[in-house]
């Protein structure tokens, strides 16, 4: 194969014939590099303007870890107090009034005898109080702390281990996931952490609390009635439903409110958006003013976020599901109306013209020439919004619009009930997954696409 050589005239001729290849404008030659440079400069500016480096370095990452642990674990908080007895200083262990261990807590990891007290955190981790001296064992290391009337201080001059901190008049000891302890004048507060959600089925006031599955089953099947007015099965269900710590009944009712709120709001929005879409579609209603007024109405309704509508209707109607239904209805009427009208403007006019040619009335032209084309798409879009609104109803509920969102916000606001938050989040995820599957299955039947239901 011989190489093709071109002289200067031929090269000039090719350049003149194909200027878009050989003499491309500056903007086209450097478009991609300029876009890349702009992105890099913008990211550098954002990093500087928002001080992202400082925000990351000063972030309280330890608090994030503590909050995450509270989702899947719980704490028991005994307090050891120094009291003066016949034999000098003695230890007395007390628990909070509403302890997860019940009215008479006696855990095996707390030992109290002869005026002394010990808290076991693990195989090599423990805290022992004897007199006014605390001995802390942690991973083979030992720390002695002396408690005085005005301060708690290390008993020797050795440097504190990495897991202990001297702060003001107290010594704080960190046992990792197992918990922590604060050694203060005249008392020691202990936070002992365990995996799981305590009392999830029965609370401490239930006669079934603390019983094994076999014992509960035996009490329900063959045990004597605990309350004469109801069977043990009814009593067990009542205790679960009205669990004072987890409030299953209230949570599930609020979840049902959220589902109904999303369904009713979406249904009403679809019913109102349908006739308005026929007015907004130029090919269906050839009236410029009617088209524009309806489309601007759609723009107004959907330009205000659902969250803002929820705030407005909460103020107008008070907290409750009505505010949430109204917020969903207003937002989705605008969005569905826009989608429906655009779908109508893109239909095949041949079918409509065919119905009109046989002398059908205008109403029958829409009924037989338009509706069959667009109804599967309309219903599919409405189902998608119903699925999406199940999630959105949770968010707007947090501002007082009712449902599980308000319950979730109340639990988060206390900043101490994160296990309940995790429970409600998991419940919301399950409901969303179920409704997503139902919506996909129904939309696949409407559109005839079996692949949708297999996603």
Image (cartoon, rainbow, N blue to C red):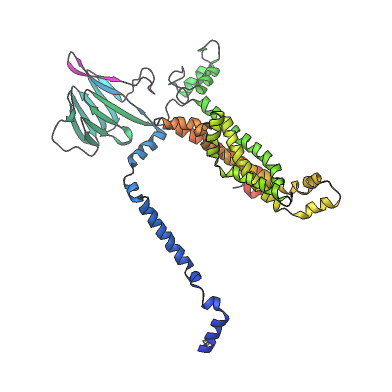
Q: Position of residue 257 (x, y in %)?
A: 57, 30
Our reading of the magenta stretch's main secondary structure is loop
Depth check: 27 or 447 in front? Answer: 27
Q: Does 271 appear above or below 373? A: above
Q: Quadrant of residue 231?
A: top right
Depth check: 11 or 170 in front? Answer: 11
Which residue is most to the front? 289
Q: Does 233 appear above or below 360? A: above
Query: Residue visible at 66% across and 42% down?
Result: 442
Residue 445 appearing in the image:
no
Q: How many marks?
A: 0
Which residue is most to the right? 359
Q: Does 141 appear above or below 244? A: below
Would you say 85 lies left or right of 75 here? Answer: left
Query: Residue visible at 60% across and 34% down?
Result: 326
Query: Residue visible at 48% across and 32% down?
Result: 408
Which residue is most to the top? 228
Query: Residue visible at 46% across and 32% down?
Result: 409
Depth check: 146 or 335 in front? Answer: 335
Q: Position of residue 317 (x, y in %)?
A: 57, 29
Would you say 273 lies left or right of 163 here? Answer: right
Please tell me whether residue 94 belongs to the stretch shown in magenta: yes
Residue 141 appearing in the image:
yes
Please tell me whether residue 105 belongs to the stretch shown in magenta: yes
Which residue is most to the left? 157
In magenta, the rendered stretch is 83-108
Q: Does 383 appear above or below 189? A: below
Would you say 246 lies left or right of 106 here? Answer: right
Q: Position of residue 200 (x, y in %)?
A: 46, 27
């Amino acid at each position: 194969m011989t190489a093709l050589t071109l002289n200067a005239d031929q090269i000039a001729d090719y350049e003149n014939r194909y200027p878009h290849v050989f003499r491309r404008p500056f903007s086209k030659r450097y478009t991609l590099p300029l876009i890349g440079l702009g992105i890099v400069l913008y990211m550098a500016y954002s990093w500087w303007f928002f001080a992202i480096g400082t925000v990351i370095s000063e972030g309280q990452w330890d608090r994030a870890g503590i909050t995450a642990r509270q989702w899947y674990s719980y704490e028991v908080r005994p307090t050891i107090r120094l009291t003066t007895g016949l034999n000098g200083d003695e230890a007395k262990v007390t628990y909070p009034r509403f302890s997860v261990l019940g009215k008479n807590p006696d855990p095996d990891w707390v030992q109290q005898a002869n005026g002394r007290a010990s808290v076991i955190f693990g195989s090599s981790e423990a805290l022992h109080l004897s007199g006014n001296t605390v001995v802390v064992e942690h991973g083979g290391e030992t720390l002695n702390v002396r408690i005085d009337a005005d301060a708690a201080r290390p008993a020797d001059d050795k440097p504190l281990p990495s897991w202990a901190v001297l702060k003001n008049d107290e010594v704080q000891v960190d046992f990792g996931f197992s918990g922590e302890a604060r050694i203060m004048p005249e008392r020691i507060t202990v936070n002992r952490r365990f995996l799981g959600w305590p009392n999830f089925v029965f609370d401490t006031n239930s006669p079934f609390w603390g019983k094994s599955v076999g014992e509960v089953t035996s009490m329900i099947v063959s045990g004597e009635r605990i309350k004469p007015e109801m069977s043990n099965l009814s009593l067990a269900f009542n205790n679960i439903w009205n669990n004072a710590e987890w409030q299953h009944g209230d949570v599930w009712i609020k979840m049902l409110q959220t589902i109904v709120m999303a369904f009713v709001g979406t249904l009403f929005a679809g019913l109102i958006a349908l006739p308005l879409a026929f007015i907004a579609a130029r090919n269906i209603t050839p009236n410029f003013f009617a088209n524009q007024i309806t489309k601007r109405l759609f723009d107004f309704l959907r330009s205000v976020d659902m969250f803002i509508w929820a705030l407005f209707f909460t103020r107008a109607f008070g907290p409750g599901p009505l505010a949430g239904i109204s917020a969903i209805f207003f937002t989705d009427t605008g969005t569905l109306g826009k989608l429906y009208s655009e779908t109508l403007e893109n239909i095949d006019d041949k079918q409509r013209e065919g119905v009109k040619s046989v002398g059908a009335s205008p109403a029958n032209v829409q009924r037989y020439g338009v509706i069959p084309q667009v109804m599967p798409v309309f219903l599919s879009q409405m189902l998608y919004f119903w699925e999406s609104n199940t999630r959105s109803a949770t968010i707007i509920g947090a501002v007082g619009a009712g449902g599980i969102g308000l319950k979730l916000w109340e639990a988060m606001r206390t900043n101490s009930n994160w296990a309940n938050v995790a429970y409600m989040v998991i419940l919301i995820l399950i409901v969303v997954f179920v409704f997503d599957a139902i919506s996909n299955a129904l939309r696949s039947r409407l559109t005839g696409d079996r692949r949708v239901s297999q996603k």
